[in-house]
């Protein structure tokens, strides 16, 4: 299936929100996650703050409300609006050279939605949300590998861990990003 960036982001954002809905009902916000030293709320805060930081450098952004769920939904909506209009095609000099807002939303923030959904689901014990789509995982594994050593900078990803011999594409991505997928 050939997805546009907007379509992929919409699907990943909906899946991310669905996990958050289940965390709301299970009240697992303080559960530890595979992100060392971070609980479920910390991972959500990271997703909201990094998205807001990036978007705020390129478009007008409403102030954060301080309510993480509300701020996530605002970022999700704004990202979809940007991906649906001319702002997504705006070029700028990125960390890896010339890029567009849409490409960065996909390359970094889309991968965050996929992987941090797993982190949150794993921490909250939501087994139904721990399976990563094979096509998404392969897409982001290719992008992650292309990032080279930058991916291993302090605060980004830990060292790669060995993937099991029978690892799925999702498990390969998680292992590459420094997580034990099982």
Image (cartoon, helix red, strand yellow):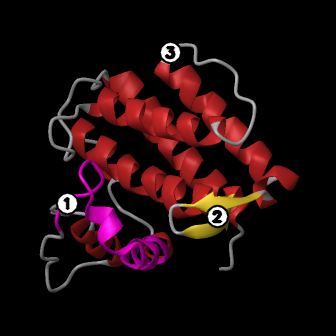
Task: Residue 54: give x, y in percent of width and height.
Answer: 57, 43
- The quarter of the picture where the C terminus appears is bottom left
Is disc 2 surrounded by few (<14), some (14 to 19) or many (20+) residues within 10 Å?
some
Please determine whether, in this image, residue 170 is positioned above or below residue 2. Answer: above
Location of mark 1 (residue) = 179
**Residue occupying the point 77% across, 55% down:** 88
In which image quadrant can residue 102 be found?
A: bottom right
Left or right, residue 132 beside residue 154? right
Front: mark 2 or 1: 2
Looking at the image, which residue is at 51% across and 24% down? 69
Give the image location of residue 52, x and y in percent: 57, 34
The residue at which mark 2 appears reads as 103
On the picture, is 133 further left or further right than 121? right
Whichever of callouts 2 and 3 sits on the residue coming sooner in the sequence is 3
Magenta highlight range: 137-159
Q: Quadrant of the N terminus?
A: bottom right
For the residues labelled 2 and 3, say whether their Cβ atoms are less than 8 Å apart. Answer: no
Query: Nearest the camera: 96 or 54?
Result: 96
Q: Is residue 118 above or below residue 143?
A: above
Residue at image location 26% in from the left, 63% down from the top: 152
Label 1: few (<14), some (14–19) or many (≥20) C-alpha neighbours in 10 Å: many
Q: Is residue 153 magenta?
A: yes
Q: Please, what secondary structure does the residue beneath circle 2 have?
A: helix
Predominant secondary structure, magenta span: helix
Q: Which residue is mark 3?
A: 67
Instruction: Determine the residue positioned at 52% across, 48% down.
Output: 15
Relative placement, left or right, of 116 versus 9 is left
């Amino acid at each position: 299936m050939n997805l546009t960036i907007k379509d992929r982001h919409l699907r990943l954002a909906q899946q991310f929100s669905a996990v958050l809905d289940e965390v709301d009902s299970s009240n697992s916000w303080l559960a530890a996650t595979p992100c060392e030293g971070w609980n479920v709320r910390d991972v959500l805060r990271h997703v909201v703050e990094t998205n807001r930081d990036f978007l705020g450098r390129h478009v007008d952004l409403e102030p954060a409300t301080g309510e993480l769920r509300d701020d996530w939904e605002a970022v999700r909506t704004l990202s979809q609006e940007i991906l649906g209009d001319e702002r997504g095609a705006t070029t700028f000099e990125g960390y890896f050279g010339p890029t567009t807002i849409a490409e960065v939303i996909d390359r970094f923030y889309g991968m965050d939605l996929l992987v941090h959904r797993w982190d949150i689901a794993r921490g909250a014990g939501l087994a139904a949300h721990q399976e990563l789509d094979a096509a998404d995982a392969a897409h982001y594994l290719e992008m992650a590998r292309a990032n080279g050593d930058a991916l291993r900078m302090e605060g980004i990803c830990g060292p790669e861990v060995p993937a099991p011999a029978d690892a799925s594409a999702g498990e390969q991505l998680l292992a590459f990003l420094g997580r034990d997928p099982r």
